[in-house]
Image (spheres, helix red, strand yellow):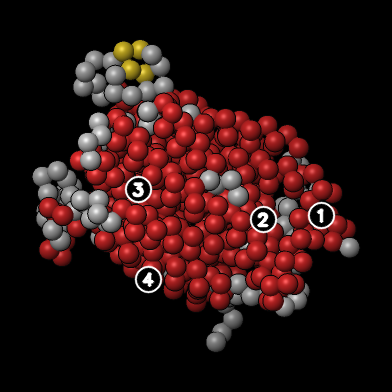
Amino acid sequence: MGEVSQRKRIWGWYFFDWASQPFHTLLLTFVFGPYFAGVAAEYYMTSGLGEEVADARAQSLWSLCLTVTGLIIGFGAPIMGALADTAGRRLPWIIGFSVLYVTGAFSLWWTFPDGSTIWWMLMAFGIGFIGAEYALVFVNSQLPSLGNQAEVGEISGSGFAFGYLGGIVSLVIMLLFFMELPNGKTLIGADPAFGLDASTNEGTRIVGPFTALWFLIFILPYLLWTRDTRTPPQGKGVGDALRLLTNTVKSLRRRLSLSAYLGSSMFYRDALNGLYGFGGTYARLVLNWELVSIGVFGIIAAISAAAFSWVGGKFDKRFGPRPVIIVSIWVLIAVCVTIVSMDRQQIFGIPLEEGSGVPDIVFFVCGALIGGMGGVLQASSRSLMVRHTDPKAPTESFGLYGLSGRATAFMAPALIGVVTALSGSARIGVAPLIALFLIGLFLLRWVEAEGDSETWTVSSN
């Protein structure tokens, strides 16, 4: 087989983002998450609970799922990275976790509207989410091989932008041809495609198989063009992998910048994941939006994310990732304050007329900022991690990065769940995200703008 050009390798790498993004766009945030929350809330109301209590119980249940999967993802990611680095290969791991992605996503078809399968579907979603996040650890570790330090920020931003475009296209297809309005028709006034039964929400439930099929089709350019970038094997088996990981963790005490960065990203990425995980359910439970409205909201957020990620990559290349991250966090803090201070009756304590469209307009703006600044934050965070990466063990380094983003991934959903339960309000339950963003911002003070990748050789000797 002929040699693949560097340009093709980069585009193949972009296609992994295109293929995998619908799990986050369609399943986590804008279609399945809100659908599940609605099904769970109806299930609890039929059990005799009032609407607000049922909404809070549904949000707590969703937070439990994200908490458990976050724990599994967070503490497993560094071990998986170390195992890959001892063998020097990544592709077998990517394929294995992709199988979990497809299996979990496809199974969501059986999320019946009567709530009879909600626990089984939480497990299926968790399996798919674990597969998606673990595969991403190995794909992210290929970023240092795609360009030099001055180029990776722009490559990372363009990858996220291309991925978000995939999320937009997939969401538009769902809205136009599958998801039902209350009248049983899609957004273009047609019946759901392929004879799907709107009365049992088959047009919405098809989102699981659709996401799985999308991934299987669009992962092909990645497999064909982005060849497995091998690193020299550093041992064999679990024992050597754990020793490699242990040595790396011990070296953190001599690397203030990396330690501070991992701690900072642990908090601010957890808060961002909380926004992604609960943005759609907030719209469903607090603002009482229909699923199609949430889908339109998702398109606006995804378009914003694609545009901002591309522009953010340019700013990253010019100014470096650290200042881009700081600005993004401050904007997201402002968004969280707005969300917590708003419901159907008031905004920042100012009463609204009954039926006012102000909350809807404000939340659409918030959605655009969550998507846009969230995309920038993720892209520049990946870029800054490259500046702290061991060139001999990039998968393990990004495993630690995955750990920093997931080790406390239980924190945001758990805090949201606790505050929601204590307050009895799905709106107030989002408040802990503000504190998580602020802690992440504070820890960035000790992060070197250019990283400390050059100290790996010294610290490993």
The Cα–Cα distance between marks 3 and 4, rounded to whole angstroms, is 24 Å
Residue matched to label 1: 251
Res. 365 visible in picture: no
The Cα–Cα distance between marks 2 and 4, rounded to whole angstroms, is 30 Å
The Cα–Cα distance between marks 2 and 1, rounded to whole angstroms, is 12 Å
The Cα–Cα distance between marks 1 and 3, rounded to whole angstroms, is 39 Å
Earlier-in-chain disc, 2 versus 3? 3
- With 288 as the anchor, is 92 left or right in this view? right
Amino acid type, label 2: Leu
Estimate how packed mark 1 is, as few (under 14), some (14 to 19) or many (20 or more) residues with alpha carbons within 10 Å: some
Nearer the observer, 448 or 266 = 266
Amino acid type, label 1: Ser
Residue 244, image quadrant: bottom right
Earlier-in-chain disc, 3 versus 4? 3
The Cα–Cα distance between marks 2 and 3, rounded to whole angstroms, is 28 Å
Q: Secondary structure at mark 1?
A: helix
Residue matched to label 3: 33
Residue matched to label 4: 217
What number is the disc on residue 400? 2
